[in-house]
Image (tube, coloured by chain):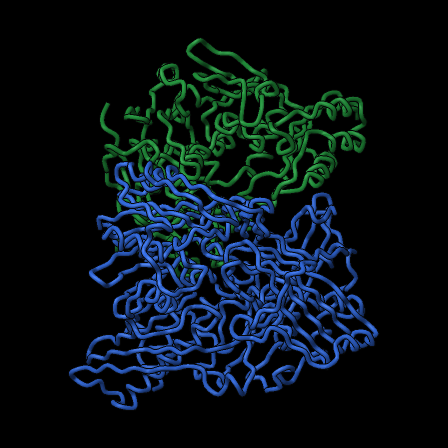
Chain colours: A green, B blue
């Protein structure tokens, strides 16, 4: 196996001797590329955003913005990265840099390189096309949500939006646009002390059998926080985000199966509307920067009670395919969580895929209540799926987040709903307000969470989406 | 000294923009990259009140790569500096997060690992961190920050309130807030012999010089601080904090180049915060809206180790006419870190309360809140009894109302719906003092070369690199490319720090004075062998003879989801009277950024103190929310024609802070207009809709 390396701004640099916990951000900055900044070390501010060449869904390669503060640099072995320093030429600013500079998008400048990279990723989005402007889309097709994971304390964001909405299409001879038409770097198997990227699933399972205490990482959006803020120094990290066996997405009449390592951004693109409830969830999940790395497997694997994927998948009655050296088993998601950040998954087991049975509920709805519109943790998340026949609810599945030590099914409410006239759900909403054991904390009071449970069902019933 | 193409007043682009978008300007921590630097990590007290009874650093010292562990037992002794920054000088612990030891190591990884191996035992008592008006230990500080009187009383306020036909008597609360510039505080320090060399993130190197020289017992010549680029500050980088001293100590002990960057979490305890306030507002008025009495009583906190008395009610002393008026400030000394200044200290929380109370009075009177303000416009400073240098609040209110579409507003609250959204609009006024501080500038002229203009000014994102170059170009009568500006270095001519919106009014005239000196001595001709001239500027008679303030008016539309309580602000208008505008692009950004921070104050920002442990529970950017892109709607900014020549020769007023003043009140007032409910404690989070 060749020694690990990374191509940054067109130059290939060895990664020999780099510890497993070293983030791409720290490595870049120690290498002298200090354009990417640390503002929070937990994927909240986006000052560390860089561009990574990833396989695309509509072009062979897609420049994808990632939080460099979360990703172990060894996870980028064999990959291509572009930082703010690598955009433009010594003589000319890149179009994104030019617009940011002339429209006052940079004040103190500290968040700027991160904004530039996030903006460049959207600049290069292959299906970005001019259209009718909306408050969050420019006439140039720029989706402002591309900047949802970048915080700025100086500008009030409007000069940054001005820059984003002023961007034209990339020039015909734009090198990075051209790069998107050629295949992305393949995943490079990596095996250095403390960090391994196995080539395939059997190799991964063998590694896990050998290292029962190994930390499994995909997008590293959770692991990176553990490393940076809690000082986690795992003896062995196993990167599974490029395992081909975890990358399938298939839709049949019986089941929708989503590979556990497909990023949330890819899930949305590749499902192409096949799971309407996920389409309601995904735009509200953290930020684009996080969704570009985060996976369903990771969101469920951490077992967090406030991960937003679980309530939706519970409402879809989803199950997980767990795989180990001993073989596969399928576990209903409702039976998966056993306690705060705990689950039935054993050491040596991986989540291979999420399965959503067909047909999905006829009507679905999702509400995420948070203190800030985007880039925030849910106070309460409620996902609902119901079948309605002749105005009567015949089946109901409800998943809740943020109201107990684990994501839960709202079983009593489901029972109360069955037989009810839709959308007259007031009685069931009262039951829902009593589900779980919500806490008082700085995100919301228990009373507010209860009120939001009730209101969520009322709101969903008033505006449900046909599946 | 005139040129047809003036740079001042134009929309010239930020000259540091191209390098910033390329990621190529060096911030403090990015200096000395090639040096064999060592790294500092801090051991912080989990105890908010108590003392260190023992420290065992042996395990940490045994880690390979650890160079030193400094504690109160072995750290270098510091000179006579403020108690709040006397770090590692005593075993006493006065706030949660106080440094009790630092580890210096060859790598940051080793330093951080070793921090966990320093064993510290404490004797502790329950912390006292809860501010309330019922405390029996509230006391009046000797004076407020910036030298303001603690209290002001004119007339018999209680009698006037008792007689007033219409009154409001309301209490507003604002929470602890943290500045949170995106760049963390950072210092690189090295002793070159007996000279302390520092690269540091601050709001003006000269702000730090007196403190750091005293701390280390060195002369000004023995200290050299460089900070050309600073990644935001908003007050937290104005003063010397413990980390700069820790870096200097660590460099002294190890003889190495030391790098110290605080973590985001550490910034919640080590670089200050905005005090919470509890403010009682009582207003008395005649039925026609004429104010007869204003009373503004403030309770706020300070720390055990500092008396920081924020001037919360001083804006109330000048906003409106009223024959009877009173402002008071009382402090509680709590087991919290020392508060500091945060964008518009005093005015931001104080005007939130006053302008909310004015809105409540307008509602009591059944009057247009714009009209209520116009009716109480004072023609002189009502407490100092001196003329205004310029006061254009009326123009701001009327032009703002026009731009926003205020005319015809139905003043009844809670009667507009758009689907599930309750819709309302609100207005609030703004003010911020105009001041100047002593500053000096130097111009080096060599025939055939650009002028070199030097001043220890600071650009923390304000645009000073650009605006000072514009001012110098005009003063010298040359295009901007004939000026090379040098700022952010303690070896440059002394200048005031970037704070209190005093930068442009202090630095600009100093540069103009130097240019005038050049002109007076040499006319338009630079001597063949070159010449260096200096100029200085500072407060003059205007400070005593005039009352000088920027003014502004905010208008906001608010939508509240009646099912969830979520709040949106789809549009805001701000019109300001800020004297001569030097650069229309940077001015807009500054005002917009201030208004957005006001929006953030209204809806998001709150540092939650854990009452049992005394620490800030939400000490990171995931849990301490600042407004994100999607929170900001359409923002319309304008300024009225104004030149304040009476205050300073540039005719400018500061622009960095007025944007935040009053914007939270406009949003709170619009929330009431939308819903019919007053939320009197910021931030207006969704759950407050349900109580």
A52 lies left or right of B35 = right
Q: Residue at x 47, y 68 (%)?
A: B587
Residue in the image at 42% along x and 81% along y: B538
- Image quadrant occupied by the N terminus of chain A: top left
- The single residue placed furthest to the top in the displayed view is A326
Q: Position of residue A267 (x, y in %)?
A: 50, 30
Quadrant, the C terminus of chain A: top right
Residue at image location 77% in from the left, 75% down from the top: B158
The answer to whether any part of residue A158 appears in the image is no
Q: Is residue A30 above or below residue A260?
A: below
In this orientation, does residue B193 appear?
Answer: yes
Q: Nearer the viewer, residue B541 or B251?
A: B251
The number of callouts visible is: 0
Q: Is residue A444 above or below residue A357?
A: below
Left or right: A277 in relation to B458: right
Residue closest to the eye, B114 or B427: B114
Quadrant of the rendered structure where residue A378 is?
Answer: top right
Farthest residue to the left: give it.
B529
Residue B318, x across and y down, in percent:
63, 77
Please identify the quarter of the rendering in which residue A108 is found: bottom left
Image position of B285 with respect to B172: above or below: below
* Image spot of residue B582 (x, y percent): 44, 74
Q: Position of residue B290 (x, y in %)?
A: 76, 78
User: Is residue B21 found left or right of A447 in the rendered image?
Assistant: left
Between B103 and B228, the residue placed more toward the observer is B103
């Amino acid at each position: 196996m060749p020694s690990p390396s990374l191509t940054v701004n067109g130059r290939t640099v060895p990664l020999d001797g780099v510890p497993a916990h070293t983030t791409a951000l720290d490595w870049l900055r120690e290498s002298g590329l200090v354009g990417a900044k640390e503002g929070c070390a937990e994927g909240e501010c986006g000052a560390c955003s860089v561009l990574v060449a990833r396989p695309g869904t509509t072009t062979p390669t897609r420049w994808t913005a990632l939080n460099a503060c979360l990703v172990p640099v060894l996870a980028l072995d064999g990959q291509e990265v572009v930082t703010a320093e690598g955009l433009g030429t010594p003589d000319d600013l890149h179009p994104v840099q030019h617009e940011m500079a002339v429209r006052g998008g940079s004040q103190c400048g500290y968040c700027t390189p991160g904004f530039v990279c996030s903006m460049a990723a959207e600049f290069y989005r292959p299906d970005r096309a001019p259209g009718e402007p909306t408050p969050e889309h420019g006439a140039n097709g720029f989706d402002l949500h591309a900047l949802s994971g970048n915080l700025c304390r100086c500008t009030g964001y409007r000069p940054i939006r001005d820059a984003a909405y002023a961007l034209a299409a990339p020039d015909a001879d734009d090198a990075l646009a051209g790069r998107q038409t050629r295949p992305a770097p393949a995943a490079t198997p990596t095996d250095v002390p403390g960090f391994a990227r196995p080539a395939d699933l059997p190799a991964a399972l063998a590694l896990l059998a050998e290292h029962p205490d190994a930390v499994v990482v995909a997008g590293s959006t959770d692991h990176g926080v553990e490393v940076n803020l809690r000082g986690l120094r795992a003896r062995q990290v196993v990167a599974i985000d490029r395992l081909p066996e975890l990358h399938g997405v298939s839709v049949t009449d019986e089941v929708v199966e989503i590979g556990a390592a497909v990023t949330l951004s890819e899930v949305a693109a590749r499902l192409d509307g096949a799971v309407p409830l996920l389409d309601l969830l995904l735009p509200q999940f953290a930020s684009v920067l996080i969704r570009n790395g985060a996976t369903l497997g990771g969101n469920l694997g951490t077992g967090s009670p406030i991960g937003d994927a679980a309530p939706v998948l519970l409402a879809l009655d989803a199950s997980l395919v767990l795989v180990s050296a001993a073989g596969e088993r399928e576990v209903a998601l409702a039976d998966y969580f056993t306690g705060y950040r705990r689950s039935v998954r054993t050491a040596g087991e991986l989540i291979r895929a999420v399965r959503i049975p067909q047909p999905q509920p006829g009507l679905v709805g999702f509400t995420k209540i948070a203190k800030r519109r985007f880039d925030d943790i849910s106070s309460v998340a409620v996902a609902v799926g119901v079948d309605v026949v002749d105005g009567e609810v015949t089946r109901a599945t409800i998943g809740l987040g943020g109201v107990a030590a684990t994501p839960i099914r709202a079983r009593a409410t489901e029972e109360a709903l069955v037989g009810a006239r839709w959308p007259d759900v007031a009685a069931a909403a009262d039951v829902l307000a009593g589900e779980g054991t919500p806490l008082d904390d700085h995100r919301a009071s228990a009373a507010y969470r209860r009120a939001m449970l009730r209101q969520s069902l009322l709101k969903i019933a008033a505006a449900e989406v046909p599946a | 000294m005139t040129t047809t193409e003036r740079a001042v007043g134009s929309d010239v682009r930020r000259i540091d923009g191209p390098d910033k978008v390329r990621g190529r300007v060096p911030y403090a921590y990015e200096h000395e990259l090639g040096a064999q630097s060592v790294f500092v990590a801090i051991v912080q007290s989990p105890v908010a009140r108590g003392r260190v009874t023992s420290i065992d650093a042996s395990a940490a010292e045994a880690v390979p790569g650890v160079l030193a562990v400094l504690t109160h037992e072995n750290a270098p002794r510091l000179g006579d500096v403020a108690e709040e920054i006397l770090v590692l000088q005593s075993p006493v612990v006065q706030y949660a997060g106080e440094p009790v030891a630092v580890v210096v190591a060859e790598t940051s990884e080793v330093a951080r690992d070793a921090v966990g191996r320093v064993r510290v035992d404490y004797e502790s008592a329950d912390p006292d961190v809860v501010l309330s008006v019922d405390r029996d230990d509230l006391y009046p500080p000797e004076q407020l920050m910036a030298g303001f009187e603690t209290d002001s009383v004119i007339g018999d306020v209680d009698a006037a309130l008792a007689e007033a036909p219409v009154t409001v008597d309301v209490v507003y609360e604002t929470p602890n807030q943290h500045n949170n510039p995106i760049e963390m505080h950072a210092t690189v320090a090295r002793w070159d012999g007996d000279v302390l060399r520092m690269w540091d993130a601050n709001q003006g190197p000269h702000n730090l010089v007196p403190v750091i020289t005293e701390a280390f017992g060195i002369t000004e010549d023995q200290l050299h601080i460089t900070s050309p680029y600073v990644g935001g500050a908003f007050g937290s980088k104005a003063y010397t904090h413990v980390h700069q001293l820790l870096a200097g100590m660590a460099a002294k002990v190890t003889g190495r180049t030391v790098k110290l960057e605080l973590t985001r979490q550490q910034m919640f305890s080590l670089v200050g915060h905005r005090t919470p306030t509890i403010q009682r507002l009582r207003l008395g008025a005649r039925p026609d809206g004429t104010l007869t009495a204003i009373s503004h009583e403030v309770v706020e906190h300070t720390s055990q180790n500092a008396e920081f008395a924020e001037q919360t009610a001083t804006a109330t002393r000048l906003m409106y006419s009223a024959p009877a008026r009173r402002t008071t400030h009382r402090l509680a000394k709590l087991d919290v870190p020392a508060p500091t200044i945060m964008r518009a200290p005093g005015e931001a929380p104080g005007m939130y309360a006053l302008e909310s109370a004015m809105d409540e009075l307008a509602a009591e009177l059944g009057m247009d809140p714009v009209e209520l303000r116009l009716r109480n416009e004072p023609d002189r400073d009502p407490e100092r009894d001196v003329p205004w240098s310029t006061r254009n609040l009326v123009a701001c209110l009327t032009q703002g109302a026009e731009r926003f579409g205020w005319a015809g507003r139905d003043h009844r609250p809670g009667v507009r719906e758009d689907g599930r959204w309750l819709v309302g609009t609100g207005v609030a006024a703004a003010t911020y003092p105009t001041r100047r501080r002593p500053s000096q500038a130097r111009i080096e002229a060599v025939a055939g070369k650009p002028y070199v203009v030097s001043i220890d000014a600071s650009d923390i994102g304000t645009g000073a690199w650009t605006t000072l170059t514009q001012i110098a170009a005009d003063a010298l009568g040359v295009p901007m490319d004939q000026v090379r500006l040098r700022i952010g270095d303690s070896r440059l001519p002394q200048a005031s720090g970037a704070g209190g919106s005093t930068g442009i009014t202090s630095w600009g005239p100093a540069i103009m004075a130097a240019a005038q000196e050049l002109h007076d001595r040499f006319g338009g001709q630079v001597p063949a062998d070159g010449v260096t001239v200096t100029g200085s500027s500072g407060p003059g008679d205007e400070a005593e003879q005039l009352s000088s303030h920027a003014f502004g008016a905010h208008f906001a539309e608010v939508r509240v989801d009646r099912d969830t309580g979520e709040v949106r602000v789809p549009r805001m208008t701000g019109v300001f009277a800020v004297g001569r505008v030097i650069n229309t692009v940077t001015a807009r950004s500054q005002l917009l950024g201030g208004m957005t921070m006001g929006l953030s104050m209204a809806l998001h920002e709150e540092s939650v103190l854990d009452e049992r442990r005394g620490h800030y529970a939400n000490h990171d950017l995931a849990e301490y929310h600042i407004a994100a892109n999607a929170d900001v709607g359409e923002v319309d900014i304008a300024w009225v024609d104004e030149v304040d020549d009476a205050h300073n020769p540039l005719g400018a007023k500061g622009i960095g802070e007025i944007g935040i003043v009053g914007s939270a009140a406009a949003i709170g007032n619009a929330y009431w207009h939308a819903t019919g409910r007053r939320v009197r404690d910021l931030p207006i989070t969704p759950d407050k809709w349900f109580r």
